[in-house]
Image (cartoon, helix red, strand yellow):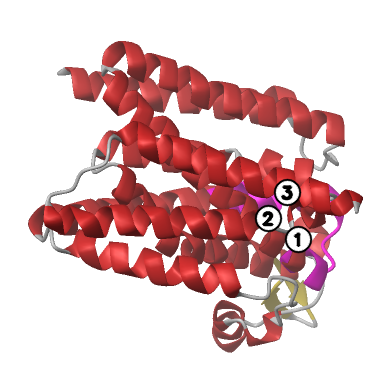
Amino acid sequence: MDASQTTYLIFGLVLLIALVFDLGLLSKKGQTVSFRMAIYQTIFWVTLALAFFGFLLYEKGQSTAIEYISAYLMEWSLSIDNIFVFILIFSFFSVKEQYYGRVLLIGILIAVLLRIIFITIGVALVTRFSWLLYIFGGILVYTGIAMFFAKHGEQTDLEKNAAYKLLKRFFPMTSSDGGGKFRIVENGKKVYTNIFAVVILLASTDIVFALDSIPAVFGISQDKLVIYTSNIFAVLGLRSLFFLLQGAVNRFKYLPQGIAVVLIFIGLKMLVEIFNIHLPVYVSLLVIVACIGTSMLYSFYRQKE
């Protein structure tokens, strides 16, 4: 077993132990997650991600470790944007708080599996067709500009959501939560509950966000280890982050603009490599921290006015 395989094995074991600890000790089935518990869980996942940064620093060196922490911060900030949509989905289906934890867990685990598939395909394509990175760069610049000028206060009509319309077309649906079950018998027929619909929508929503975030990570690093681990750590920490921020999402009014600037920067960073211009990896880290931090601070400042 080589060093790379050992690193993946350690990463997998750490995640397995962390999930067992989180679900077995920090969470209970049907339990409403309090703000205090959300703080503990968020600290737990962030600490775990930072500990892996320390492991990479020791095992792989400074360059790989900085690429990892830059990619993680990028994914983490983008995941905050996911929370806005998650809250909308729970509100639309009137999901009871006691089901939030279980629904989020299942939806996020599905999203992790789908991301692993997408990343694997992306790595294979980029390895074979390196010019795809320039297309990714152009997409990120366009997405960043569109995000910067978009009206983020507008509500989304989930009745028009493609995934939801597809579910209603192919599955017999009911508006009942079925006591937290995915499928129940109603009037003698097996039907799928709104809990099932929420899980599918959470996973599909994350995949939509991944269409931006995965190319952004490629702009930071093409190391498979960095791409996989930063994505997985950020997504698995999304559940606790949801409970921590669900009552405070409006305080991050200008966060999308900060994320947009980061996407534009990373897109341009990928494009200028055509001219053999390569920016040091720590520059990406500084830009990410500066943009996300500034947008959050400015959001809090405007709240006080």
Q: Of marks 3 and 1, which one's residue comes earlier in the chain?
A: 1
Q: Is residue 211 left or right of residue 301?
A: left
Q: Residue at x 61, y 59 (%)?
A: 256
Please say whether residue 51 is one of the residues in the magenta stretch. Answer: no
Q: Picture coordinates of residue 60 (x, y %)?
A: 26, 18
Q: Residues within 10 Å of mark 2 (few under 14, many from 20)?
A: many
Q: Amino acid at mark 3?
A: Tyr
Q: Residue at x 48, y 28 (%)?
A: 15
Identify the magenta region. Answer: 89-108
Q: Nearer the viewer, mark 3 or mark 2?
A: 3
Residue under label 3, please give it: 298
Q: Quadrant of residue 137?
A: bottom left
Q: Nearer the viewer, residue 232 or 258?
A: 258
Q: Amino acid at mark 2?
A: Ile
Q: Residues within 10 Å of mark 1 (few under 14, many from 20)?
A: some
Q: Nearer the viewer, residue 234 or 22?
A: 234
Q: Nearer the viewer, residue 151 or 104?
A: 151
Q: What label sits on residue 87 in the rendered view?
A: 1
Q: Is residue 297 left or right of residue 145?
A: right
Label 3 element class: helix
Q: Nearer the viewer, mark 3 or mark 1?
A: 3
Relative to 244, is 163 above or below?
A: below
Q: Given contact means CB atoms under 8 Å apart, are the residues at marks 1 and 2 in contact?
A: yes
Label 1 element class: helix
Q: Picture coordinates of residue 32 (x, y %)?
A: 86, 41
Residue under label 2, please give it: 83
Q: Residue at x 49, y 36 (%)?
A: 233
